[in-house]
Amino acid sequence: MQNTTLDTLTLVVRGGTVVSGQDVIRADIGVAGGRIVALADGLPPAPEEIDATGQIVMPGGVDVHAHIEQVSATGLMTADDWESATSAAALGGTTTVLAFAAQHRGMKLSKVVEDYARRAAAGAVIDYGFHLMIGNPDAPTLDIELPALIEAGHRSVKVFMTYDRLSVSDEHILDILEIARRHGALVCVHAENHGMIAWMSRKLLAAGKTAPKYHAHAHPRLSEVEAVRRVIDLARLAEAAVSIFHVSTREGVAAIRAALGDGAEVHAETCPQYLFLGPEDLDKPGLEGAKWMCSPPPRGPRDRDALWKGLERGDLQILSSDHAPYAHDETGKLKHGPESSFKQIANGVPGIGARLVLAFDALAHDGARGLVQFARITAANPARIYGMAPAKGVITIGADADLVLWDPERRRTLRDADVADRTGYTPYAGRTVRGWPHTVLRRGAVIVRDGALCAAAGSGRMVARSL
Ligand SMILES: [Zn+2]
């Protein structure tokens, strides 16, 4: 059996330092039929060979939070389409993404999913799936469409606790949690208290405080903490698991840690903008600070420390991008013109390409522990929690050959001019990172070679998921 397998290898990634689950090993990786079929030193030659000497071989990144070719509730289209967003993802070492099929008021969910799936199939260069975003929780959506779509393999649902045109009541969240539990899906939540944000925004605007930096004041830390605690309790009542998106505060981490200690089934993520940015980034002349506006906003140094610690202890299991791409011009952030208040500026920062290089720089130069932690929070955990394991997220026999070769010593300074997404900027411009992904394989096919994309639009596939 073993020899038969070795005879049929189509590709060997040779001589790299492989981060496989809990281990960091020197091994060759043998690939056949797009899957990893052998993991050992000294594999026989194959028709295609990739030399990984001196390189770190990581599992392809799994980004479970990105807004791609998505129309907002106010009708604003993201700067990226499927091809541009997933190209930027691939160049940054990500080979699987979960994005949104966004239902707004009055829309039929199954039609929404059909439209988004068609666009993804035409454009994606990496593998993908969808969170079903529920903005219209009427009876047909909840009773008929949502259960059918979950059963069809869309194993996650997104709800908002804030935003005028998107938020869902606690009662509807309970309904959705119960449906998800029954049919096998995970509910993901944007947890911020709507009333607190509306009240703070009204007071700030009335006082003439309209600049982007006031966006951070309008989203008080208490608004996150209250909503995190509330949705955990809603999930407990519905006896369902819940996943909390983009945790930004130390009190949010503490609330999740306490719930986990009580045995609650809570998953949580944070994002690069909460680990590497601060409220001071929004404080720039004119509307420049709009580039750093996202919800929740970046917090302070003590929060960043707590988020890193939360990731290390497993209170937070996932590092996602929450890539929400809007250009800093009239097509995006500045749609309402040069006099826009923070309330009129689209929320969101790009990061689908920067997520992994920032995390690699921060984690991967600290020995085996850091390498394993990087692979865990950027690939293995998100794949497992969202029902994509064992095909995605780990370098192991039987998994898809989604592999990234990192040059651990390559230094590069992030610049607006180099971004591959269509926002035209990076919130991390000027930062120098150490470590860069130069070769990326998706199901055994090279999609990035020496830092250049070589994948066709539409070559990504929808990932089969089960929970
Ligand atoms: Zn988001």
Image: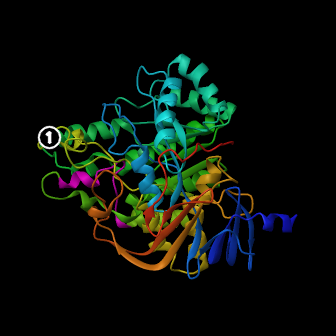
Residue that appears at 67% across and 31% down: 151
**Depth check: 85 or 163 in front?**
85
Instruction: Check if residue 296 falls in the magenta segment.
Output: yes
The answer to whether residue 248 shows anywhere in this view is no
Judge whether 231 appears above or below 405 on screen: above
Q: Name the residue at the front extreme.
A: 47
Residues packed near mark 1 inside 10 Å, few (<14), some (14 to 19) or many (20 plus): few
Residue 460 at x, y percent in the picture: 54, 47
Residue 144 at x, y percent in the picture: 60, 20
On-image quarter of the C terminus: top right
Residue that appears at 80% across and 67% down: 7
**Depth check: 445 or 27 in front?**
445
Indicate which quadrant contains ligand 1.
top left
Quarter of image, res 277: bottom left
Q: On the rendered structure, is 332 left or right of 169?
A: left
Instruction: Check if residue 445 falls in the magenta segment.
Output: no
**Depth check: 387 or 247 in front?**
387
The secondary element bearing badge 1 is classed as loop
What's the magenta region? 288-301
Question: Residue under circle 1?
Answer: 337
